[in-house]
């Protein structure tokens, strides 16, 4: 079963937390944001982002789910790309998935802790994925919580990098994107996004 873009609710700015925001309200940008709880492989949108590994040949977590639903042709196309550097992004077709494209990005491994390198690499993942989307005329993009699973990046830190880069990118390129969807799989991640979205997309 697939979930069309029209069924993905647009985020409504909430007053709670907005007072701590360093950004001004921007209603045009607010309408481009969604927080979606569920399986990213079901989204019928232009592009879903995969939290892949350097080989691009598939792995566990969201990567495993994407490859399972897409089918073997995805792995075949990925194999032709010769891997991907951490922080970079590469695009493929989506095969059996309802999305049009998969953008594969490789998050930093943060099991040894988060330093400047991990932070910079995570920000690059979001920025390069958005750039890859717009370069391919993909106007709706969904992100999983990159690096916060097996790669061990603390979710309460990663959420800030994700939201800051999306805010920054949308301010510069709002004409090129209709929707950026934060796809959360765990209730704890949903809470983190609900808590922090008003800091980056405030109500006033
Ligand atoms: P990484 O190796 O980058 O940490 P993981 O796949 O282990 O990647 O985890 C990244 C995030 O993806 C986690 O928050 C995990 O809960 C989430 N996730 C796992 N499966 C799915 C799915 N089918 N759809 C969306 N998110 C998922």
Image: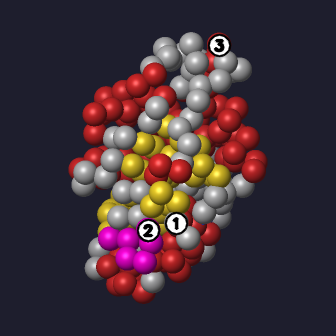
Residue at screen point 38% across, 33% down: 170
Badge number at residue 2: 1
Q: Earlier in the sequence, mark 3 or mark 1?
A: 1
Q: Is residue 120 left or right of residue 150?
A: left
Residue wearing tag 2: 98
Q: Quadrant of residue 180?
A: top left
State how far apart marks 2 and 3 are (Cα): 39 Å
Residue 55 location in percent, x, y?
43, 74
Tag 1, which secondary structure? loop
Residue at screen point 52% across, 60% down: 3
Quadrant where the N terminus sits is bottom right
Number of labelled discs? 3
Bounds of the magenta span?
93-98
State how far apart marks 3 and 1 are (Cα): 37 Å
Residue wearing tag 3: 19
State how far apart marks 2 and 1 are (Cα): 6 Å
Residue at screen point 65% across, 52% down: 37
Residue 79 location in percent, x, y?
34, 81
Tag 2, which secondary structure? loop
């Amino acid at each position: 079963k697939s979930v069309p873009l029209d069924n993905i609710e647009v985020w409504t700015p909430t007053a709670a937390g907005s007072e701590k925001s360093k950004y001004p309200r921007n209603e045009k940008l607010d309408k481009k944001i969604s927080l979606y709880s569920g399986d990213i492989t079901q989204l019928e949108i232009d592009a879903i982002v995969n939290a892949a590994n350097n080989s691009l040949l598939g792995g566990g977590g969201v990567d495993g789910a994407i490859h399972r639903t897409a089918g073997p042709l995805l792995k075949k196309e990925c194999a032709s790309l010769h891997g991907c550097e951490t922080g970079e992004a590469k695009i493929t077709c989506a095969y059996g998935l309802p999305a049009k494209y998969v953008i594969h990005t490789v998050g930093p491994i943060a099991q040894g802790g988060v330093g400047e390198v991990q932070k910079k690499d995570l920000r690059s993942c979001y920025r390069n994925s958005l750039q890859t989307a717009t370069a391919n005329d993909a106007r709706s993009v969904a992100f999983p919580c990159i690096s916060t699973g097996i790669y061990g990046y603390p979710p309460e830190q990663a959420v800030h990098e994700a939201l800051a880069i999306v805010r920054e990118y949308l301010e510069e390129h709002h004409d090129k994107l209709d929707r950026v969807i934060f796809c959360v799989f765990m209730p704890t991640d949903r809470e983190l996004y609900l808590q922090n979205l008003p800091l980056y997309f405030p109500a006033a």
